[in-house]
Amino acid sequence: MNQSELAAFLKSRRDRIRPADVGLPTGPRRRVPGLRREEVAQLAGLSADYYTELERGRGAQPSAQVLGALARALRLSGDERDHLFHLADRPVPTAHGTAAQAQPALVGLLDRLTTTPAQVINDLHETLVQNPLARALLGPPPATRGLEASFVHRWFTDPGARAVYPFEDHPHHSRVFVADLRAVAARRAKDADVGRLVATLRRRSAEFEELWEQRDVALRRTDHKRIVHPSLGVIELDCHNLFSEDGRQRLLWFSAPPGTEGAAQLELLSVIGTQDMTTGAEGLGRRPG
């Protein structure tokens, strides 16, 4: 492992990201042009001490999971992600594994969506990157790896994950998630990640097993959602999905017709930002994909 180059590369990528790019407040006393070390650690779900050691060229060789989390937090391109893995002397992950990065074309569109919540997810509903309004609406993705990174997995195994939607809407979302996953599973029949997710959910959730046996198939393209926000209450929004060319990633964004209460709530959301999310996000297991 080339520790000195790894450290320098991490620092160079950290310096180029502005807090607003990842939904963090700038603050009046910021002394660095980009993110602070502890902010990168927070975004990647790591301890500040661990990340600091990496940037100082010390510490143990980071795992593939840690490298993937850092690549997402630092918004690395595909080439930059691969370079990070090479520096850490780890095998470069496949284009669609759990360490996969948001595709540049989708990120480019995401960066242009400054007035509506938007995020890029993969087809197992793992959040790859969010814009500030999505972070304000949905909270940051949990600092978990493997199956737990999938919102579908959390939906059927963690009751707290369902707090994002009103109780009476839960059956609808369960059906949508299962039908979507069945379509993905057929397309990726030989993929170990998909097979492991389906097998785990069939074993752990009677609700999932019952819905899976119904064999409904439908990729989610649009949906009308009611989202429970801790400060603004229930927000009614339309959810849209734009699929990548290979279908394995999606740009997901929310909108509301002009003049509706949902549109007014989105405007208010842009004002309050993430100020109310810092203490409540983890407890809610937030959020959906």
Image (cartoon, rainbow, N blue to C red):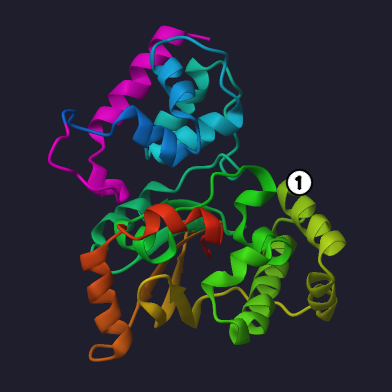
Q: Residue 113, relative to residue 56: is it above or below?
A: below
- The residue shown at (29%, 79%) is 265
Residue 212 falls in image quadrant: bottom right
**Residue 150 horizontal/vertical position (percent):** 62, 55
Hey, what amino acid is under mark 1?
Ala
Q: Which residues are magenta?
A: 1-30
> Observer-nearest residue: 267 or 279?
279
Q: Nearer the viewer, residue 1 or 184?
A: 1
Element type at marker 1?
A: helix
Residue ranking furthest to the bottom = 259
Task: Mark 1: give few (<14), some (14-19) or many (20+) Cα within 10 Å.
Answer: few
Magenta stretch: includes residue 106:
no
- 264 left or right, relative to 205: left
Q: Measuring from the top left, give residue 75's x and y in whole percent.
A: 37, 40
Instruction: Say whether residue 269 is left or right of residue 221.
Output: left
Main secondary-structure element of the magenta-colored stretch = helix
Picture residue at 46% right of the left edge, 77% below the top: 227
Task: From the viewer's side, name the closer residue of 239 and 25.
Answer: 25
Indicate yes or no whether the magenta region holds residue 2: yes
- Can residue 246 be seen here? The reply is no
Residue that extends furthest to the front in the rendered view of this protein: 279
With respect to residue 188, does 72 lie above or below?
A: above
In this picture, residue 165 sits left or right of residue 234: right
Residue 42 vertical placement versus 289 (above, below): above
Q: What residue would you read off at disc 1?
A: 192
Identify the residue at image location x=59%, y=84%.
169
Residue 267 seen in this snapshot: yes
Residue at image location 45% in from the left, 58% down from the top? 280
